[in-house]
Image (cartoon, helix red, strand yellow):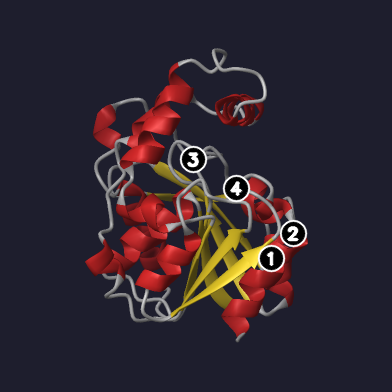
Amino acid sequence: MNETQHFTASDGTRIAWRSMGEGRPVLLLHGFCSDAQTNWIKYGAAKALVEAGFRCIMPDHRAHGESDKPHDPAFYPLDILADDAMTLADALGLTDYDLVGYSLGARTAARMLAKGASPRRAILSGMGLEGVSCTDHRRNHFRHILADLDGHPKGSAAWMAAAFIKQSGGDPVALDRILDTFVDTPEPVLASFTLPIGVVCGVEDQDNGSAQRLADVLPNAELITIPGNHMSAVTRPEFGAALAGFLTA
């Protein structure tokens, strides 16, 4: 099954989600400006997990993909993405599951853990310590990009991000609202996460700070490096293999 389904969040926002596989449930949270199809399905990560015996549950964050993209700031309170994901988990009756996030999804997964979510294992991928503990850097980076999608030097990191947003049909206003929902997860809170956590990151990826430092702060973490940078690592077969390997260890 890979048809888009929907659930209604607490504020009435319709959130799209997909499911693949029939095994152990794993909740997969995609990155900023992306969606479940691009992050998990297109390049084979979900397939690798299904083949390893998992049922992949893959929502599109609000303001992304096939989910609603409201412009009213009232729909973007602090931590709303974590609240949406926890609402979906509750609606599906997920009590014994695993949790995986990439980039924004990893930041969201960290917030879920801080708010009491209790998966068996978690993976924070495409993420470093600064990306979860001090979110202003990424917020300001993307706010600058979204303010003028056509105003960045060709070939620059901002230009590449703007091109991805335009190619994917992203809604700049709704995406900018998402930036208002970011909440820092301080190091003492990260240090309280005792479950096994995989930190999976491209060897060239420093976009969210140091993956090594994130793994060092987490008390029960394993750092797993794969080829690529922040944009390319998620497209590599090694990405899905790393997710499946950690969750089946």
Residue kind at label 2, given as amino acid type: Gly
Query: In the image, is 95 to the left or to the right of 72?
Result: right
Looking at this view, is 213 or 242 the one in front?
Answer: 213
Residue kind at label 3, given as amino acid type: Ser
Query: In the image, is 184 to the left or to the right of 243?
Result: left
Looking at this view, is 16 or 83 the one in front?
Answer: 83
**Where does label 1 land, which residue?**
240
User: Which residue appears at 36% of the width and 67% of the height?
Assistant: 90
**Where does label 3 land, which residue?**
67
User: Which residue appears at 74% of the width and 75% of the height?
Assistant: 51
Secondary structure type for disc 2: loop
Check whether the beta carbons of the residues at disc 2 and disc 1 lie within 8 A of each other. Answer: yes
Q: CA distance from mark 1 to mark 3?
A: 24 Å
* Lower sequence index among marks 2 and 1: 2
Check whether the beta carbons of the residues at disc 1 and disc 3 lie within 8 A of each other. Answer: no
Image coordinates of residue 31 in percent, x first then y, are 52, 47
Q: Nearer the viewer, mark 4 or mark 1?
A: 4
As drawn, the residue found furthest toward the bottom would be 249
User: Which residue appears at 45% of the width and 51% of the height?
Assistant: 209
* Lower sequence index among marks 3 and 4: 3
User: Which residue appears at 58% of the width and 79% of the height?
Assistant: 247
**Where does label 2 land, which residue?**
44
Q: Quadrant of residue 240?
A: bottom right
